Image (spheres, rainbow, N blue to C red):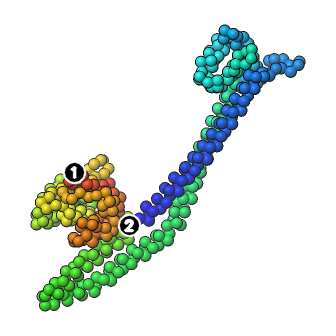
C-alpha cells in the first residue's frame, strides 16, 4: 500500500509539473514566434508603403536588406522588381512567386516550399507585392524548439527526482502508522491464540449443553478470524520475499480443486475444471493453493443453489497465465465490484452469512507478492475472479 501511495504522489506531482512546464514553454515559444512574425509583417508593410532607396552616391547593389518588392502593371504584369538581397534576374521564378501570392486568399502568407513571407497591397496608382526572407526567423524558432525540449527534459528529470524524494518524506507518517497497525494486529492476534485455546479446551471438556455449544461455536469463529488476521499480517510483513521461490502452479490449483470437490457436492454445486499442466509461477505452492481455496470458498458461499462453478488455469501469453474461478450467482453491482477486495467488506445482502470479509484481502496480498493482479467481473449470470500471474521457469528438483 505504501508503495502505491508513493507512486500516486509522484504521478500527481509529475502530471502537474508536466502541465506547468508545457504551458510555460508553450507560451515562450508562442510569444517569440508571434513577435518575430509581427516584426516581419511590419517590415513588409513599411516597404510596401515606402520602399527604401539608396542614399545619394550609394549604388543600388549595395542595399542588402532581406526583402524584395515587385510592382505590377495594370494587366498584372511585372513592371519593376527591386531589392539587392535576392537575385531578381529570373523572370520565370518571379512570376511564379507573384502568381502564388496573388492566388492566396489572404494578403499575408508564406510561399510554399520557400522561406519567404509575402505581403500584397493595392496602393494609389500601383499594386505591389513584397517578399521577405524568413529563414532566420525559422532558424530562431527551430533553435528555440530544441532549447525548450532540453529545458523541458531536464526540468522533468529534476522534478521527478525531487518528487521521489518528497514522496518518501510525505508518506513517512502514514508508513509509520501502517507499520504500527500491522504490528499491533499481528501481536494481538498472536496473544489471543493462547486464551482462546484455553477457552476451547475447557468448552470441550465441559458437560455438553446448549451453553457450551454456543461457547464452542463463538470460539471457533474467533479462531477463524484470528487465523485470517495472522495470515494477512504475516503476508504483509514478509513483503516480496515470498515471491523468490518457484512452484508448479498447476499442481497447487489442482490440489485446491480436489479438496473442494466434496464440498461442492455437499452444497449442491457442480464443479468443473480445466487446468493446463506444467504452468509455474514465483511463490510458494501452499500460498497458491490457499489462493485457489479462497476463490473456491467464495464461489461456494455466494453461488446460487444448484449453480455451476468453473475453474480454469491457462497460459494467456508466453509470459503470463490466468487463474479464473467463476460461479453462477446473483450479479454484483458496480459498487460491490469496486469494494469487494477491501478488508472486512461484505455485500449488504451477505452480511448475515458466514465469513469476516478477509478472504479476498488475503487473496490480493498473495497475488501482489507474486507480482500479479486480480480482478472481478460480473456478466451473463456469472461472477468471475481472475488472477493473472507472470510465468516462471520451473527449477529442477534435487534428487
Q: Which mark is residue 239?
A: 2
Residue in the picture at 67% in, 23% down = 119
Quadrant the N terminus occupies: bottom left
Left or right: where does residue 226 sit relative to residue 18?
A: left
Answer with mark 1 or mark 2, whichever residue precedes in sequence. 2
36 on left or right of 359 = right
Q: Residue at x 67, y 32 (%)?
A: 37
**Closest to the observer, 281 or 211:** 211
Please say whether residue 279 is visible from this viewpoint: no
Q: Is residue 180 above or below residue 65?
A: below
Horizontal and vertical percent position of residue 143: 64, 38
Q: Which is nearer the eye, 254 or 13?
A: 13
Q: Is residue 212 above or below residue 23?
A: below
Q: Residue at x 54, y 53 (%)?
A: 16
Q: Quadrant of residue 62?
A: top right
Residue corresponding to mark 1: 380
Local crowd size for mark 2, using a 10 Å CA cut-off: few (<14), some (14–19), many (≥20): some
Amino acid at each position: 500500500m505504501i508503495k502505491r501511495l508513493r507512486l500516486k504522489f509522484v504521478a500527481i506531482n509529475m502530471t502537474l509539473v508536466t502541465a506547468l512546464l508545457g504551458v510555460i514553454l508553450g507560451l515562450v515559444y508562442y510569444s517569440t514566434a508571434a513577435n518575430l512574425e509581427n516584426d516581419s509583417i511590419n517590415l513588409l508593410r513599411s516597404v510596401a508603403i515606402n520602399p527604401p532607396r539608396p542614399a545619394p552616391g550609394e549604388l543600388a547593389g549595395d542595399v542588402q536588406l532581406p526583402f524584395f518588392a515587385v510592382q505590377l502593371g495594370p494587366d498584372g504584369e511585372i513592371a519593376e522588381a527591386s531589392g539587392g538581397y535576392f537575385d531578381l534576374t529570373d523572370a520565370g521564378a518571379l512570376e511564379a512567386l507573384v502568381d502564388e501570392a496573388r492566388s492566396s486568399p489572404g494578403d499575408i502568407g508564406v510561399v510554399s516550399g520557400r522561406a519567404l513571407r509575402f505581403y500584397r497591397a493595392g496602393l494609389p496608382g500601383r499594386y505591389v507585392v513584397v517578399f521577405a526572407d524568413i529563414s532566420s526567423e525559422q532558424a530562431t524558432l527551430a533553435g528555440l524548439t530544441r532549447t525548450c525540449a532540453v529545458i523541458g527534459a531536464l526540468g522533468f528529470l529534476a522534478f521527478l527526482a525531487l518528487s521521489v524524494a518528497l514522496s518518501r518524506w510525505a508518506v513517512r507518517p502514514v508508513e509509520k502508522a501502517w507499520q504500527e497497525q500491522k504490528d499491533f494486529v499481528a501481536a494481538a492476534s498472536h496473544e489471543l491464540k493462547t486464551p482462546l485455546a484455553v477457552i476451547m479446551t475447557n468448552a470441550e471438556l465441559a458437560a455438553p449443553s446448549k451453553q457450551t455449544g454456543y461457547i464452542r461455536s463463538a470460539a471457533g469463529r474467533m479462531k477463524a478470524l484470528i487465523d485470517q488476521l495472522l495470515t494477512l499480517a504475516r503476508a504483509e510483513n514478509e513483503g516480496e520475499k515470498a515471491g523468490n521461490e518457484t512452484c508448479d502452479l498447476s499442481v497447487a490449483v489442482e490440489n485446491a480443486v480436489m479438496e473442494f470437490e466434496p464440498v461442492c457436492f455437499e452444497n449442491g454445486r457442480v464443479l468443473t475444471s480445466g487446468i493446463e499442466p506444467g504452468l509455474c509461477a514465483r511463490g510458494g505452492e501452499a500460498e497458491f493453493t490457499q489462493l485457489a481455496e479462497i476463490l473456491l470458498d467464495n464461489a461456494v458461499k455466494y453461488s446460487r443453489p444448484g449453480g455451476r462453478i468453473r475453474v480454469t488455469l491457462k497460459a494467456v501469453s508466453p509470459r503470463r497465465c490466468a487463474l479464473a474461478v467463476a460461479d453462477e450467482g446473483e450479479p454484483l453491482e458496480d459498487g460491490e465490484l469496486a469494494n469487494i477486495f477491501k478488508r472486512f467488506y461484505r455485500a449488504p445482502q451477505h452480511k448475515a452469512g458466514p465469513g469476516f470479509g478477509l478472504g479476498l484481502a488475503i487473496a490480493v496480498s498473495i497475488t501482489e507478492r507474486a507480482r500479479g493482479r486480480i480482478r472481478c467481473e460480473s456478466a451473463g449470470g456469472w461472477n468471475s475472479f481472475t488472477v493473472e500471474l507472470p510465468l516462471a521457469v520451473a527449477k529442477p528438483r534435487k534428487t
